Image (tube, rainbow, N blue to C red):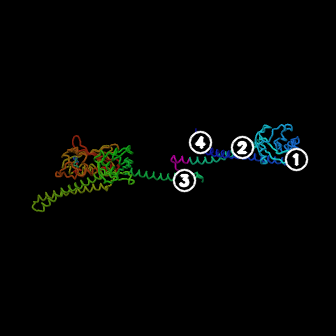
Amino acid sequence: MPRASYQTKLFLSAFSAAVLALAVAGVLLAGAARRQTDARIEATLIAEARLAAELLSRDAVRLSPNGGGGPELDAEADRIGGLLGARITLIAADGRVLGDSSEAADAVRQMENHASRPEVVEAREGGIGRSRRASTTLGVDMLYVATAVRHPAIAFVRVALPLSDLRQQAWIVLTATVAALIFALAGAAASALVLAGRMGQRVRAIAAVAEKYRQGDLTPPRLDYGDDELGVVARVLDESVQELGSRLADLARDRGRMAAILAGMVEGVVVVDPQGRLQLVNEAARGMLRIGDSAIGRHYIETIRHPAIADLVAAALSGRVSDSMELAPPRDAGRTLMARAAPTGAADVHGVVVVLHDITELRRADQIRRDFVANVSHELRTPLTAIRGYVEALSEGDADPEETRNFLAIIARHTHRMERLVRDLLRLARLDARQETLEPAWCDVRGIAQAVANDLGPTLAVRRQGIAIEVGPGAESVRADAAKLHDVLRNLIANASTYAPEESTISITARRTADEVEIVVLDEGPGIPEEDLPRVFERFYRVDKSRTRDPGGTGLGLAIVRHLVELHGGSVAVANRPEGGARFVIVLPRDGAAGTPRRR
Ligand code: ADP
């Protein structure tokens, strides 16, 4: 069964209230009207009885005084009865009936003695008597009023009216009341309908707004709620919803901002609630601790499988603020994380926020810096020690001219080496600081390789080494910084010349791949031990660690090569040839995707 609508309920309650009120009013009214009619009829009967008594006492002289109950008295009863339109009974003091308007004179004599009739008894005592009962003479319900008469024969006159007359009067009153009630009810129903309709409409409009709010649309409605209590309630609720909505929007904005900040942070953030369940783990923390999405809502002991962090969280949960600690992330011993945990929220019930910094790079950079300083000092000390030794030997003044020349040549060589070292260091510093900008142009690959060969001509000639240049189709030109490409090739070819044996050939080949140009420098030397291959591009890295057997290099050449190639957006790699010798491969984007180094 469908539930009755508010409008129906309102209508039914208003209508039933009206029905109840009208019914009560009707009953009361009908009762009152009936009582009043009764009273009025009774009063009329009393008045009529008195009138009859008066008439009889006036006519007493004219009427037979013998009191025998002759036909005159009955005729008198008939006359008065006719005048008053009621039954008149004339009763002697001893109760005999002397005349009756409803009976013939003969029948009157047969009538029962009326001395004990209640109205007669009452009239005898108080001058007037009333009774409502069935008439033994006529056999119908009657209302009797008897009054004493000042008359020689007649002691009481009694007026009677059939109750059916009375009931008829009451019936008229009742029908009129019922008719009025029906009209009133129809009116009440109509006004209840209109009122319920109007209220129902307002309630439906308010319900529609509430439904719209429930679905999340908080745009304020253009609705006049009205000034009554319903309107006030609706307006207050509406204002509360709007207020709440704007707070929710603020919250959502803050949340969004927070989420964006957390997502964009390189630091890992983990938030644990007071019960120890993970509430939030940002992207960085997921990566560092290798936690999946499913960890949210689970206990930190199950999810953060790192004893040190678990201890940190436990300490913070119990309200202790511990120092930050360094640790290696799970399954990644090469990295270093710094973790700090702090309680969040109120003093007694609080969660914990853990912040993780990946300080691997920092540590590595620190290590590199320290190694670098150590390397530089070391590299400089060797030539400086040598120079000081020879300068001291020279200053003693006992060297012959031949020795002096020798010493000076050694000093010059070391000075030269230091000079190169400082020059390379400065260049690396410039490259690190990105102070060397690229000036790309279409370069002739063969031309540059040839220029390098010419530059190194004297060295190559001394070692009787040859150079073979081969440029494949499409690889003739590449968009690059010519001077830097020259430096790259010069470094590689100089190395090849240094490490390859005399009378060998150094080959330079260029070929075109999809969008790149690949330049390969091959030599016929010993190649590079496999374990050193990944490290030869590091600063100061040398395969032969003994700097005493110095082939003249600074250990910075390949580092510069890698820097320059990457500055072009290219890459450089080294491998050993199966038949012996090192094979350096430079790959450059053909039309120069400069400025986006592939690897730093
Ligand atoms: P260096 O100035 O010492 O040559 P580089 O950075 O140019 O420094 O080279 C680093 C190391 O790589 C060299 O010390 C050498 O041991 C090795 N190396 C470079 N090129 C070759 C090559 N063509 N053949 C063999 N070893 C090489």
Of the numbered discs 3 and 1, the one sitting upstream in the chain is 1
> Magenta part of the protein: which range?
208-221
* Residue at screen point 19% across, 52% down: 552
Q: Do the residues bearing badges 1 and 4 touch, measured as CB atoms within 8 Å?
A: no
Residue type at numbered disc 1: Ala
**Above/below status of 582 relative to 393:** above
Looking at the rendered structure, which numbered label has been put on residue 236? 3
The Cα–Cα distance between marks 3 and 1, rounded to whole angstroms, is: 90 Å
**Label 2 CB, ligand 1: below 8 Å?**
no
Q: Quadrant of the N terminus?
A: top right
Identity of the amino acid at label 3?
Answer: Val
Disc 1/disc 4 C-alpha distance (Å):
79 Å
Percent x, y of residue 113: 81, 40
Q: Position of residue 437 (x, y in %)?
A: 32, 55
Q: Which residue is mark 2?
A: 178
Front residue (pair 120, 380): 120
**Is the CB–ligand 1 distance for label 1 below 8 Å?**
no
- The residues tagged by marks 3 and 4 sit, at their Cα atoms, a distance apart of 27 Å
Front residue of 341/47: it is 47
Name the N-terminal-most of marks 1 and 4: 4
Q: Which residue is mark 1?
A: 60
Foreground: 551 or 464? 551
Of circles 4 and 2, the one toward us is 2
Residue to which mark 4 is pinned: 4
* Label 4 CB sits under 8 Å from any ligand 1 atom: no
Q: CA distance from mark 3 to mark 2?
A: 46 Å
